[in-house]
């Protein structure tokens, strides 16, 4: 070690001290400048979209408000996808090496078609990263304290005020602001098909729950239904006869109304079943109660009907698990969907009706989702754990 130290500290016989100092300065400058230049070049939008597979998302970005707007302030790729802090930036650069690997070696995203197939996975990764760092890249330009809500659209001002009060992170509400949203429906629809496929093997209990709208009949073998069961509704099996089941249906209805629609709880439009004809005529009143907030009297009714086998399971939890995936894959995809307890059970009806036109949900999915939200509403408090 002593010999090595002497060699390192002894003046060179070949190079002057000035030359060595100059070489050291050049090396120091290279160490400083080259990485900085590399980071700067690889952070440009031109570099980001140089891969052929990035062209579709580049076109989407050019149609967004981040590319062209009234103020002329443009957010480039690095402004959104690279955190402003040095540790975050360096870590993001390391993560980006995987993108290069996937594009040039694994060839998993090297064409627009392959990229589209993985769009959902890539989007989920970006949303998680932004959520984990509290949307640091967004906040480098946007600040709650600097916002003038009087210059915003009234609804935007209302939502931004709530977000500022709770210090919500930007990505909760602004997914899809610069790029096309991925289709997240394949996951929850596959989950439902698996649930439906296993229904026959899981319908042997005395208490069953509906997966879909199911017609009910006054007598076994009837052709004309006498009402229907709504998705995620509970029935009690009284008798089994081949492909037919006699079931007991219980629900609440306004005492002074037509009593054709049964709800799960008094005063809350969480629909269980519609009944008519003989099924309605044979309904019995079990009890009555007056809803304090409205002064309206409700009656708890019980009736029997026949249903055919299929789309019935003996546990409600897989239905709620599926609907949670449906909620996250639809309502929570493009904006920050309200917390499920943000509205009461009846309030969710109008809220969901106002948004359903922006989705591709069918009637079964819509009704199942509504019941899920109602069962987690502010005035039911997770009542799905009891039903």
Image (cartoon, rainbow, N blue to C red):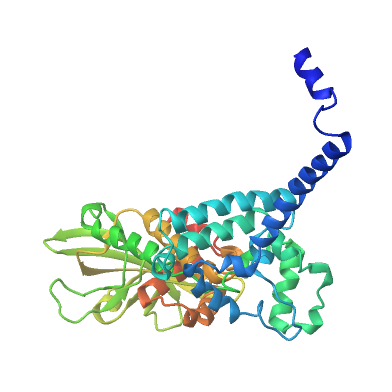
Question: Quarter of the image containing the N terminus?
Answer: top right
Depth check: 96 or 204 in front? 96
Residue drawn at the location 85% of the way across and 26% of the way down: 11
Kindly tell me whether residue 286 is visible in this rendering: no
Residue 9 pos. (x, y %): 84, 23
Task: Answer with left or right where residue 239 lies relative to residue 293.
Answer: left
The residue lying furthest to the top in this view is 2
Residue drawn at the location 71% of the way across and 67% of the way down: 163
Vertical order, 9 against 330 (above or below) = above
Report how many numbered discs are placed on residues in the image.
0
Residue drawn at the location 44% of the way across and 65% of the way down: 115
Task: Answer with left or right where residue 71 lies relative to residue 54.
Answer: right
The residue lying furthest to the right in this view is 18
Depth check: 113 or 293 in front? 113
Residue 91 pos. (x, y %): 64, 49
The residue lying furthest to the front in this view is 14
Vertical order, 366 against 246 (above or below) = below
Residue 168 pos. (x, y %): 70, 62
Residue drawn at the location 76% of the way across and 52% of the way down: 33
Kindly tell me whether residue 133 is visible in this rendering: yes
Q: Quadrant of residue 193?
A: bottom left
Q: Quadrant of residue 243?
A: bottom left
Depth check: 370 or 188 in front? 188
Residue 235 pos. (x, y %): 31, 62
Depth check: 122 or 191 in front? 122
């Amino acid at each position: 070690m002593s010999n090595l130290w002497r060699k390192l500290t002894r003046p060179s016989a070949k190079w002057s001290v000035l030359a060595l100092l100059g070489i050291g300065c050049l090396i120091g400058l290279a160490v400083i400048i080259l990485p900085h230049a590399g980071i700067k070049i690889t952070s440009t939008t031109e570099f980001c979209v140089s891969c052929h597979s990035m062209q579709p998302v580049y076109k989407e970005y050019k149609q967004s408000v981040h590319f062209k707007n009234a103020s002329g302030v443009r957010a480039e790729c690095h402004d959104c996808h690279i955190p402003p802090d040095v540790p975050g930036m360096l870590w993001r650069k390391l993560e980006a090496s995987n993108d290069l690997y996937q594009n040039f070696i694994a060839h998993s995203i090297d064409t627009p078609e392959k990229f589209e197939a993985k769009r959902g996975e890539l989007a989920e990764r970006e949303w998680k990263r932004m959520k984990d760092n509290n949307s640091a890249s967004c906040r480098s330009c946007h600040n709650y304290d600097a916002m003038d809500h009087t210059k915003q659209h009234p609804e935007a001002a209302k939502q931004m005020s709530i977000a500022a009060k709770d210090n919500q992170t930007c990505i909760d509400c602004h997914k899809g602001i610069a790029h096309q949203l991925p289709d997240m429906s394949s996951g929850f629809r596959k989950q439902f098909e698996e649930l439906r496929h296993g229904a026959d093997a899981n319908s042997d209990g005395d208490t069953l729950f509906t997966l879909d709208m199911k017609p009910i009949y006054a007598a076994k073998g009837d052709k004309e239904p006498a009402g229907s069961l709504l998705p995620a509704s509970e029935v009690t099996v009284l008798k089994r006869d081949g492909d037919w089941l006699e079931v007991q249906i219980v629900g609440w209805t306004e005492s002074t109304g037509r009593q054709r629609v049964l709800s799960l709880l008094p005063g809350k439009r969480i629909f269980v079943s519609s009944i008519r004809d003989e099924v309605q005529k044979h309904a019995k009143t079990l009890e009555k109660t007056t809803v304090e907030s409205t002064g309206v009297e409700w009656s708890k009714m019980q009736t029997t009907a026949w249903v055919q086998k299929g789309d019935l399971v003996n546990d409600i939890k897989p239905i709620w698990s599926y609907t949670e995936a449906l909620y996250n894959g639809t309502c929570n995809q493009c904006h920050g969907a309200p917390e499920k307890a943000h509205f009461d059970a009846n309030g969710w009806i109008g809220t969901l009706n106002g948004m359903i036109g922006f989705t591709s949900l069918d009637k079964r999915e819509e009704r199942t989702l509504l019941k899920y939200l109602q069962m987690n509403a502010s005035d039911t408090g997770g009542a799905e754990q009891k039903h």
